[in-house]
Image: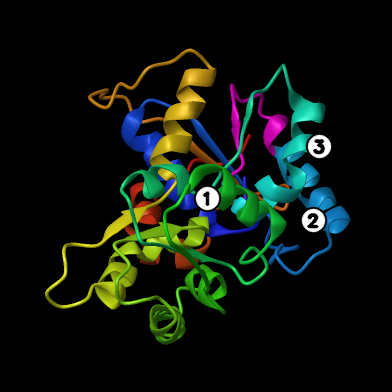
Amino acid sequence: MDSGIGLLAATAAVRRLRPDADLVLSLDPDGMPWGPRTTEDLTERAVAVAEAAAAHRPEALIVGCNTATVHALPTLRSLLEPGIPVIGTVPAIKPAAAGGGPVAIWATPATTGSPYQRDLIRDFAGGVPVTEVPCWGLAEAVEHADETAIDDAVAAAAALTPENVTTVVLGCTHYELVADRIRAAVQRPGRPPLVLHGSAGAVAAQALRRIGAGPAPGSAVLGSVTVLLSGRPGGLPAPALAYAEGRLLQAVSPAS
């Protein structure tokens, strides 16, 4: 679940690990973007989207959104667990810092400098130099597959990223859809290859662990994809097909 197509990264990661899994994608086009909303309003939207997904009796629910994880995860877990395990999305600060840094965390302006992110830096980054980089308009540009706006937002964030950075944490699930563009913008000539850390792979693996399932990437059975748009049966939004992750999920079955 997510407000928009930021959930594609984790969904595609699940699809690659388990081609036989039936997937339910619950988006909220009526309420997006969630970032500018109050905690109470965002939580209300997230609960509605989660309950629409839960009606399909999933084995687990992935909150494919950093913002919703920050604000709504405790409420979602209180409502759905233990019947449905709820897996949140947390920026990969710990594994990024393990490489020694310096590290840049690209995140939405609302998350950058937030107590939530600062706590993660304090708890997991140790003495590694960390720069928080606000990415103005990048999530919205990715959501609409607006090529010019994506390039402009990536360039603006790259200009705020110190030249000696060796590692970038992608602190919003939307950013994982344009990881190659971010790498190209931040990579400095003559420096070692930039390391990017997203959350999708770890989130997908955690979801499988929570339901006691293992990876089976060689499975020949292609699971179905059901899309819910603010609770209504629908299909993948057209911008999703601009990304490899969306095209992987292009075969959509009607919601039951």
* CA separation in Å, label 3 and label 1: 19 Å
**Within-10-Å neighbours for mark 3: few <14, some 14–19, many 20+:** some
Q: Does the magenta stretch include residue 127?
A: no
The earlier-in-sequence mark between 1 and 2 is 1
Q: Which residue does the numbered mark 3 point to in the structure image?
A: 75
Q: Residue at x 51, y 57 (%)?
A: 171
Quarter of the image with the N terminus in it: top right
Q: Say above or below: 158 vs 101.
A: below
The label number, if any, that marks residue 42 in the structure image: 2
Q: Is residue 57 magenta?
A: yes
* CA separation in Å, label 1 and label 2: 16 Å
Q: What stretch is highlighted in magenta?
A: 53-63
Left or right of 42? Residue 165 is left
Q: Which residue is drawn at 43% across and 61% down?
A: 129
Q: Which marked residue is nearer to the observer: mark 1 or mark 2? A: 2
- Residue 7 visible at all: yes
Q: Which residue does the numbered mark 1 point to in the structure image?
A: 7
Of 106 and 250, nearer the camera is 106
**Within-10-Å neighbours for mark 2: few <14, some 14–19, many 20+:** many
Q: Say above or below: 148 vs 217.
A: below
Callout 3 touching callout 1 (CB < 8 Å): no
